[in-house]
Image (tube, rainbow, N blue to C red):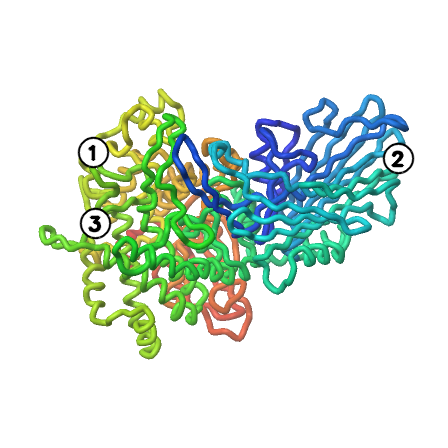
Amino acid sequence: MSEWTWEWTGYDPAAERLRESLCTLGNGYFATRGALPECRAGLVHYPATYMAGCYDRLGSTVAGRHVVNEDLVNLPNWLLLRFRLRRTADTWGPWFSPHAPTLLDHRHVLDLRHGTLTRSFRHTDHRTGSLRVEQTRLVHMGDPHLAALRTVFTAEDWSGEIEVESALDGEVINGNVHRYRSLNRHHVTHVRTGAREPRTVWLTCRTSSSDVVVAMAARTKLAAGRVPATSQLRPGRCRAVHRLVVPVAPGLPARVEKTFALQTSRDTAISDPLGEAVDRVSTAADFPGLLETHVSAWERLWRRADFQVPGEAGRILRFHLFHVLQTLSPHIADLDVGVPARGLHGEAYRGHVFWDELFVLPYLDLHFPEVSRALLNYRYRRLPRALAAARAAGRSGAMYPWQSGSNGREESQEWHLNPASGRWLPDNSRLQHHVGSAIAYNVWQYCEASGDTEYLHTRGAEMLLQIARFWVDLAEYDPGTGRYRIRGVVGPDEYHDGYPGAARPGLDDNAYTNVTAAWVITRTLELLRRLPAWRRDELFHRVRLDAGELPRWDEVSRLLRVPFHEGVISQFAGYVDLTELDWAAYRDRYGTIRRLDRILEAEGDTVNRYKASKQADVLMLGYLFSPAELRALFRRLGHDLTDDVWRRTVDYYLRRTSHGSTLSELVHGLVLAKARRADAWQYVHEALEADIADVQGGTTGEGVHLGAMAGTLDLLQRGLTGLETREDALWLDPVPLPALSEYRFTARYRNHWGVGIRRRSGQVEITVPDSEESPIRVMLAGRPVTVAPGETRTLPIPDVTADHASRDD
């Protein structure tokens, strides 16, 4: 395999769903899993197509409890194409199945450079002969409404006929996640089918409650001017079928091209989705033409996004980038969508939007700022719902949901079923209010990187202000400590959702929550000072804020409580009182303990009793902020965060984390790299391979972990370079990681397209492309350098053993 291709050989039913996720093709508007075209959904295969932002909400009765869920909808299957061989003049052989012993030399090749998936195999019929089959598919990156599948049949030692059945299949449910099998999964209704001569079939349907109209059309034909022996269009109740009888002979390959178009009532600049789909597919180019324009579109993407990292790590990073681009391509700049935690690759988490954008947008900011802006607009459009949620909770400002879908209401369940015990448990994950800080962080980072002052002063300012307002209102002054406290929340750890035996859920003074809240308030105050007076007055009037409230905001930002114990930062108040867990005993008993919370609950115990974390919590602070900025934050809060305190904190939680999330290894890897730790690579390596090796409990078949994939890109782009965009400068402070000691990438910074950053041999090289723009100010380990357009500067990396605490903040 080359650095641009990934290959799977043989046919392994147990691994098919994983391969289907990893071979998903998409263009930001929609994506199709890498399923075999001849297979319908079952225990082994799961063909599925998802359109970004297409949700549907249904009620279900599970174990006697009524629950309501909103899901990303599995749309009708456009990929279906099967074949069989004529055995006699009057009889046909069975439809080909990959489970039959007639399957030989099965192989899949995913081409990242060109955005195609090619499958090849041999089918040997003992009564007819051997047939070679090669199938190439694409989901068009140039025209987001098109996809295509080309199948080439080559008879090796016989002549005869093949019957090909190409269909649009509306008999689909949301069945990708076995855990959800008890839920109502019938999101597609009112299926209608039809045909347009001479070779187009169509299907329309609606989503059950959201009433999105979905229209599909498929054109199937023989390529190169050949005409099938017979051709029949057969619309049915839920399936529209086109059957062709195709002559084959040695040396005379038959190329069957299936072109597909998707339109919905959510689209802009259309009148009738069905008419648009039929027109689009009827006028689409043949497969070679579509492939050419598709590859050209991918070439443009790679020019803006690609990087050079030698070795296997670089190969995996490019694989991650491929899937990020397929889910969040520039096409979504015109869509109202967020970052689905599992991409458009499967149905885990029901396609909801969590805080994963925190790990995604920093990469996009420096390559596709128009995509970052669109994703932030998804949050802005749901600001009224977040304001309403805060009011309903008796609070001011914006309380964004932990899980968001179509309209920004809280989609988190109030109860969840533990499959290990069969018991229903309260789901307190909605108390993860730190999602608001993640949104604010992304607004600030986007505006710093892009220089988009207009957004910062308008929508960005409004979101920042309302999120800061929520934190200020939530903070309660404690006369006993002289500090403000935030009570009743859940931190990123997720295991701990309350104190042992407590009547109310939530924890007090979660360090991550309080420090990030202080950061949000501080940045908002800074922005308000920088705003033009007329805009500040306009904003205050719009959100009904009295400037007299701001002194309290400043006080809260300086006096939020951060608990400590035993010389380390406490994850939350009272953490020190919890019991130590016998980690070795549980690993010996259960092997994998990633879901330690479920294990303990099934034993009649609770993880709330123990010093045990699912994933990075306190250490997330080291992921988001540079050492200098983190020290400054703690100084503002009245604490001296020395290197020694941080080092002890890292070691303390490293020993008490089960890594039950793919994000955990990512965060730990970067934090350890920043701390100059030799064991950083162990965690980085695990983060790189998490989806590929499917180490996360076998759930990648339900969708890739998009945040972790994008996070590995950010680890290279910002983490290892120490790259920050602040104070109208690019800040660099490279950290050593021997396995990733050489790299090169380009980034878009403000109005400079393609700023090159290269590290090798103890040096960093910065190239600014020629333009009429102003020079870029670069701060390398705190030392200023100016690089003019058209100039390349090669600078030595300072000694990594230098005391970072001595540098200016």
At 27% from the left and 43% from the top, the residue drawn is 647
Residue 760 point in image, percent of width and height: 49, 51
Pick whichever, 55 or 467, lies toward us. Answer: 55
At 38% from the left and 60% from the top, the residue drawn is 383
- Compared across the picture, whether 549 is left or right of 342 comes to left
| Residue marked by disc 1 | 501
Task: Indicate whether 290 appears above or below 653.
Answer: below
Q: Are marks 3 and 1 in contact (CB under 8 Å)?
A: no
Residue type (three-letter) at the residue carrying disc 1: Gly
Residues at marks 2 and 1, CA–CA distance in whole angstroms? 76 Å
Local secondary structure at mark 2: loop
Residues at marks 2 and 3, CA–CA distance in whole angstroms? 76 Å
Local secondary structure at mark 1: loop
Badge 3: residue crowd in 10 Å (few <14, some 14–19, many ≥20): many
At 53% from the left and 53% from the top, the residue drawn is 328
Of the two numbered discs 2 and 1 in the rendering, the one whose residue sits closer to the viewer:
1
Q: Are marks 2 and 1 in contact (CB under 8 Å)?
A: no
| Residue marked by disc 2 | 249
Residues at marks 3 and 1, CA–CA distance in whole angstroms? 24 Å
| Residue marked by disc 3 | 562
Q: Is residue 21 visible?
A: yes
Badge 1: residue crowd in 10 Å (few <14, some 14–19, many ≥20): few
Task: Indicate whether 668 appears above or below 14.
Answer: below
Q: Residue 549 lies in what quarter of the image?
A: bottom left
Total of numbered circles in the picture?
3
Badge 2: residue crowd in 10 Å (few <14, some 14–19, many ≥20): some
